[in-house]
Amino acid sequence: MPGLLRDYFVVLPDSVAGHAVAGQLPVPDAVAGQLPVPDTTRTAGGAGGTVTVAHPSGRPWVVARPLVRKVSHLRRGDDALVLIGPDQVPEAVLAGLLEGARDRAGLERRLARLPGLHHVIAHLSGETWIRGTASGLRRIYHARHAEAGTIASDRPAVLAHLTGAPLDDGALALRMLDFLPHPLSRRVLWRGVHETGAGYGLALPVAAPGTAAAPGPREYRWWEPPPPELPLAEGARRLGDAVAASVRAHIGGLDRISCELSGGLDSTTLTFAARATAPAELSLLTVAARDRYSEDETWARRAVEAARGGHTDTPALAHHIIPADQAPYFYADLAATSAELNDEPLPVAPGRARAHLLLSRAHATGSRYHLTGYGGDELFLGLPHAYQDLFHGNPLTAWNHLSGLRHQLGWPLLPTLKALLNRSTFPRYLAGAVTTEPQPVTRTPLLSWGVRQSLRPWFTDHANALITEEFRAAAAGQAEPIDRWRGRHVDIDAVRMGARHFQAMEDIGMTIGLPVAAPFYDDRVLEATLAVRLAERISPWRYKPLLVEAMRGVVPDALLARTTKDHMSSDEHQGLREHAPDLADLWTGSRLAERGLVDARHLLRLAAEPFSPVLVEHSISSTVAGETWLRTAENAWNPPDRTPTTSEASR
């Protein structure tokens, strides 16, 4: 059964019907047996590492199949707390979180001190509530089961399996865009399955005495971004502490770990943070670039030399360089994407073979956990939209910074002034966020609520109508931004978009048997970043100034001096040529075409013309991702497995 390799959990109501649903949960196939057994007490009768936490009645409340993550739980009378995260949380810590928390707000104040990326499931004052992370890496979905009522999970495909939900063509058409802005990113691929927004939790009230059915679920906001008030020095200290705590939460105490060391500032930071946890063996992996002007490998070698030199407590450190000619181009081995059923199609799917190679090499070193620098660009580079926020309180500083950026990017003066003074609302932005016009040129100032995208020439009229209607409906519904300040909205939305993309890496790691982490997506890291004064957090004259200051004393100054970043666009363009036959096979019998969303003949012509100007102007990666995801989703489910429930659940 493909696509069921990632772990999942479900939250069930305290009823006979809820108990029955537990017996219908899909079971991961044999590949999951290669993964480490969770370090947690298993319920009697649980299969495949199943962990069941029961209601007071004995019926199953939380049923988890954690291939990598750890389930920690504690009950005190009618109150209970379950944390699903990177490591086991000691019972004393759980007790400190739960005891004395009179309500949800009280528990949240205690949870704010907990590092790492956790799902939280709690029962307080007669109410069950569930939440993921503010960064969006850990999400919550819910659906209504015909007999059991509302059930929740971290995997929409599991809920679709349990409820028989069909695929939603409107949501699928949206995923053929390269960027799906808030709130459209919450559109789930199955009808009747709903995503709870990042920063929001899901409350599941119980049935009132004497009634048969519980009230419906409701969302509540549990997270607000902090005000940007801290000076750079204080913010850097907090950020450094948050990064170190998140790294320890993932790999602290492990003897063998690995890091992707691209040579960039983000991966270099995590390499030195990982080294500080003192593992017995630390493996660093660098993929050499084909571009002879690339600087990444040079900087990676410098980082390794610095990590090895002058320290008696240095762990055994190995540097593995993967030769450029061994690294797959983009669009290689597209059929292998069926090994994981991601929550949604992701534009990173065409690069799966490259990611699989890197993680396989890391796994071969004996690594028990792999760290990556994903999230660093979204957090620390700073997007131009932020100068809209700065302009409100400090127009001279904003214009000074923006002038420097304008000269670097070649933005004309008058269009930049016009964009800076624009005060259009978020719904108005959504209404015009997709267009049939050509892509905006690179010299177009980017100061709105997000990017404006062109519909692809291979989209059908039906797909275009679905996409534009989705945007129109969101705008007409007066969709609210993540934050009232334009720049903060864009910053947070970019982090959450990146977190969705990173989840594909987690799923590949589970296929291989190697846990993969991106500590920069920890909520404490996000909060520490957003708390810094905007004029000090980003600058057109300094590269990632907040991260640089946060890592002083951890990363050598010579490595913090890098101000460049390599790109792999040539590998993508070359991949279109190298794998043209595979792309042609993909569009022959296209599932997207069968649904009336793409013109397969147009895509076949483009496969035969990989250097077509159309493919220079329009990326095809999201369409490829949608096609491969759809094939996996259509074939993922066998008839529901009837597995025995645990002996804790009453008959």
Image (cartoon, rainbow, N blue to C red):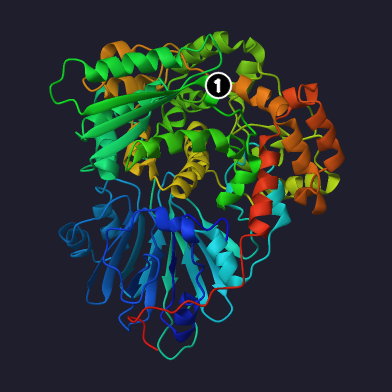
Q: Position of residue 225 (x, y in %)?
A: 39, 41
In the depicted view, which residue is nearer to us: 553 or 544? 553
Residue 79 vs 213, above or below: the answer is above
Q: Quadrant of the N terminus?
A: bottom right
Residue plotted at (40% across, 34% down): 372
Q: Residue 632: give x, y in percent of width and height.
A: 64, 54
> Residue drawn at (43%, 82%), measured in percent from left and top?
207
How many badges with numbers are in the image?
1
Picture residue at 33% right of the left edge, 66% below the top: 122
The answer to which image quadrant residue 41 occupies is bottom left
Q: Position of residue 647 (x, y in %)?
A: 34, 82
Horizontally, residue 638 falls left or right of residue 254, namely right
Category of crowding for the residue at label 1, using alpha-carbon neighbours closer than 10 angstroms: few (below 14), some (14–19), many (at least 20): few
Residue with the most extreme bottom position: 210
Q: Is residue 50 above or below residue 197?
A: below
Residue underneath mark 1: 325
Q: Is residue 408 visible?
A: yes
Left or right of residue 346: residue 87: left
The quadrant of the image that shows the C terminus is bottom left
The front one of 374 and 27 is: 27
Which type of secondary structure does the marked residue at label 1 adopt?
Answer: helix
Q: Nearer the viewer, residue 383 or 605?
A: 605
Q: Is residue 425 visible?
A: no
* Amino acid beneath label 1: Asp
Taking 400 as reference, is 421 left or right? right
For the point 74% across and 37% down, the residue is 583
Residue 598 screen position, x and y as percent: 80, 44
Q: Nearer the viewer, residue 485 or 465?
A: 465
